[in-house]
Amino acid sequence: MIKRFKDFFNKYFKNLFGKKKEVKIGLYGPPNGGKTTLANRICEDWLGEQLGNVSSVAHETREVQIKEKVVIKSGNKQITFSLVDTPGIATKIDYEEFVKEGMKEKEAKNRAKEATKGVIDAIKWLDDMETVVVVLDATKDPYSQVNITIMGNLEARNIPVLVVANKVDLKKADLKKIESAFPKYDIVGISAKYGKNVDKFYEKLIEVAGK
């Protein structure tokens, strides 16, 4: 009953005053799916600057990073938003994985600790999101990349979701596999690294964020 009243209240005031000028859009997904690469692509395209560092080692992004007042346009439509790049969501973070990448044990344990805190922070930030972009690696099994709890949380909150199948420039990329795994959601295949199909991504993002 309370939820129904809240939905009515929000819808009523959106219609009365129009939609908020600036929304929070969060990038979520597994480590190394390409969230920060996509965040940098967006910021470079529309602000002329990068947002964060990219690395082949998982959990390079261990803190939430925000860029405010990003304006993107597609055709005669545009949207202004705060872009929130979140740490990679993982159910288990083992420091030994970082040791395999060449880190010393102390550094690896510290990174694992920071990464775990980053995952917790990312989940907390879901409460503030008005649209979520789930960034997946199109060369990998979609079911092994997305925490079902996160997708369930998004659905329960009625948060509009756009699924991005990243790395479509690679031979192993399988867009159809991503589409069949998430039939309920809008999906767009891109290469954030090379900018392939990002125009379609911007068009879809404006459409989904406006729902």
Image (spheres, rainbow, N blue to C red):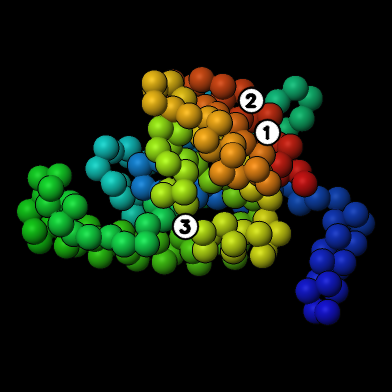
Q: Amino acid at mark 3?
A: Asn
Residue for badge 3:
147
**Residue labelled with disc 1:** 204
Residue type of the residue flagged with mark 2: Lys
Rendered location of residue 174, percent (x, y): 48, 29
Residue 90 visible in rendering = yes
Q: Nearer the viewer, residue 122 or 91?
A: 91
Residue 16, quarter of picture: bottom right
Asked whether the viewer can see residue 166, the reply is no
Q: Are marks 1 and 3 in contact (CB under 8 Å)?
A: no
Q: Nearer the viewer, mark 1 or mark 3?
A: 3
Give the vertical position of 150 relative to 181 (above or below): below
Crowding at mark 1 (Cα within 10 Å: few <14, some 14-19, many 20+): some
How many angstroms separate mark 2 from mark 3 (CA)?
A: 26 Å
Do the CB atoms of the residues marked 1 and 2 lie less than 8 Å apart?
Answer: yes
Q: Position of residue 60 (x, y in %)?
A: 30, 47
Pick the front one: 38 or 165: 165
Q: In percent of the image, x 42 and y 41: which residue is there?
A: 141
- Residue 45 located left or right of residue 118: right
* Residue furthest left as drawn: 104
* Secondary element type, mark 2: helix
Q: Which residue is mark 2?
A: 200
Work out which quarter of the rendered image holds the N terminus and state it. bottom right
> In x, y percent, where is residue 6?
81, 71
Image coordinates of residue 129 in percent, x first then y, are 61, 57
Q: Earlier in the sequence, mark 2 or mark 3?
A: 3
